[in-house]
Amino acid sequence: MYIPRILLCGNAKNFLREIDNRPVEIVGRIRFKGAAERGEFIMPAHKTAADNFTLKPGDFRIFLDDNEISADELQKILDGAADYIVIENHEEFLARFRELYALKFIDRVVTVPTLLNYVRDGFFSLNNAVQIFNLIHAQNFARVLDFDGYFAANDYHMFPDLNRKIDGIVRDVEFPALENFYGKIFASPEDCRYKFFDAILLTAERSPAEFIDAVISTDAMTEKILTFARKNSALESWLVENQKIFAQISFRPAINGSLYLIEKFTSKKFAAYVVTHKKILLDLPDGYKIIHAGHALTTETFGELVDDAGENISRLNLYLNEVTALFWLWKHTHQSHVAFLHYRRFFTADGQNILTADEATEILRDYDIIVNECKFGFVSERDWKIMLSGKTLAENARAALRKFIALRQPDYLDAFDRVTDSFGVFCYEIFVTRQNIFDAYCKWLFSFIVDATEEFLATSKISDDPREYRAMSFITEHLLTVWLMKNRLKIKPLPIIFRDDL
């Protein structure tokens, strides 16, 4: 927790009563002698007048704990032991304003209301807010996440960001006017955990350990961190001493500290996995690999990867089809971006060629997931499944899935029911996304699908007709749509190339 260190100018008893036990550290008592003591009143006025105002030697005197000090000595204290000068009396603040402005202390001088309303999670300075805002735009960042709600906590949000480059996490939106500044407002980090940003802004006071936790918790969300470290703080020392753990780190001076732009080491690895159950000859782009689904049920091998090495559910391939390959990939691979495809269906960006790694990763800078274009029809999904597998098997499969979704993922039951009776879904369970989203979907799916399938098999009479033993896989194909219904992802639909010659 950030505890402001202050030099108090004014009545200590009144000050402590006004802050009502708010944690502060009073490091000294300060007072001034200047125009007010000479019976003069210098209006704060506008910036131009303040810039043109000059002090004569001896016109303004500074006393710390009754000992006179110079302006240079006060600056050293503000560079080390103290964060603010708090002036308890409003009239005195106005009377001293232009003199303190002339000495370049005004960024460090606050009144009690300012201390209470603005100095919260970290050091407050409007000058720093301006500098951070300008830096974000100078770097040409398209999307930045204000992780600590920094701009919401100071008055810079009164200047709408017309380019809507900045999104913010604001737990309680007290004033709807914030919506004019932020492109999007999230109530918590959880709400934007699947998003990707060009940079994340961390401004709250953090210890080195807390900063590391914040970087780790947002690791999948960005490659760059923009942070403020207070002068002589533990975080400032840690950043200086540990520069080599980052790919690049640069800093620029700010009021009472520095702004650090940090680029993390990242593994930009794209992998596209093409699921097959038979021998195929394909000319695939770089980064594409073929995985043999249902390898446990055959004596032949088709592809570079198989779905029965190590932990696997390959034995269920007859009933779950490509899902057994999906399980294996979830358990045994890791990359920054992953595509899951069928041997006959491939995404295309231009309508002619298979989507490349560069095209996919570029799209995923602005979107969270690529899926096939939604298919609409006049027959509901439930009726389609009945038509494919017969009413008894289709309904048994649906009931088994519904039972285990209710047990393991109850928040998704309404979405499952809606998709079951819907007229439009994202077909084929093919997609391209970032690894953290891939992991989240698989964790959800495999929390229930295996048990639901085994119950369906144990309670159903199934022939060797593919339309019957694939009854569960027909429904499973649309579970991605169920998951997408409940998660705030920015979806990019793309057409597919269908290889009917395979």
Image (cartoon, rainbow, N blue to C red):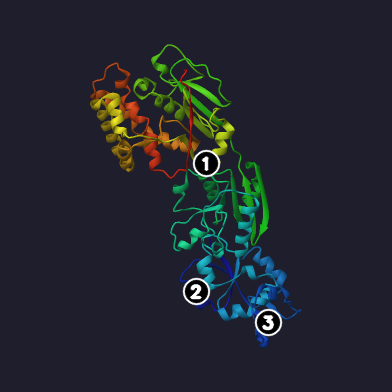
Residue 295 in picture, x, y percent from top left: 42, 17
Which tag is nearer the camera, tag 3 or tag 2?
3
Looking at the picture, tell me which residue is in the foreground, 208 or 326.
326
Looking at the picture, tell me which residue is in the foreground, 101 or 437.
437
Placement of 418 over or under 48, stated as above or below: above
Which tag is nearer the camera, tag 1 or tag 2?
1
Q: Which amino acid type is shown beneath numbered disc 2?
A: Leu
Whether residue 207 is visible, yes or no, is no
Residue density around tag 3, few if under 14, some if 14–19, many if 20 or more, within 10 Å: some
Residue at the spot x=61%, y=39% of the render? 265
* Residue furthest to the right: 57
* Pointer 1 residue: 220
Q: Which amino acid type is shown beneath numbered disc 3?
A: Gly
Please tell me which of labels 1 and 3 falls first in the chain. 3
Looking at the picture, tell me which residue is in the foreground, 125 or 487.
487
Secondary structure at badge 2 equals: helix
Q: Give the quarter of the image for residue 83.
A: bottom right
Q: Which amino acid type is shown beneath numbered disc 1?
A: Ala
Whether residue 251 is visible, yes or no, is yes
Residue 454 in picture, x, y percent from top left: 29, 25
* Pointer 2 residue: 16
Residue at the spot x=72%, y=69% of the render? 72
Q: Give the quarter of the image for residue 439.
A: top left
* Residue furthest to the front: 378
Secondary structure at badge 1 equals: helix
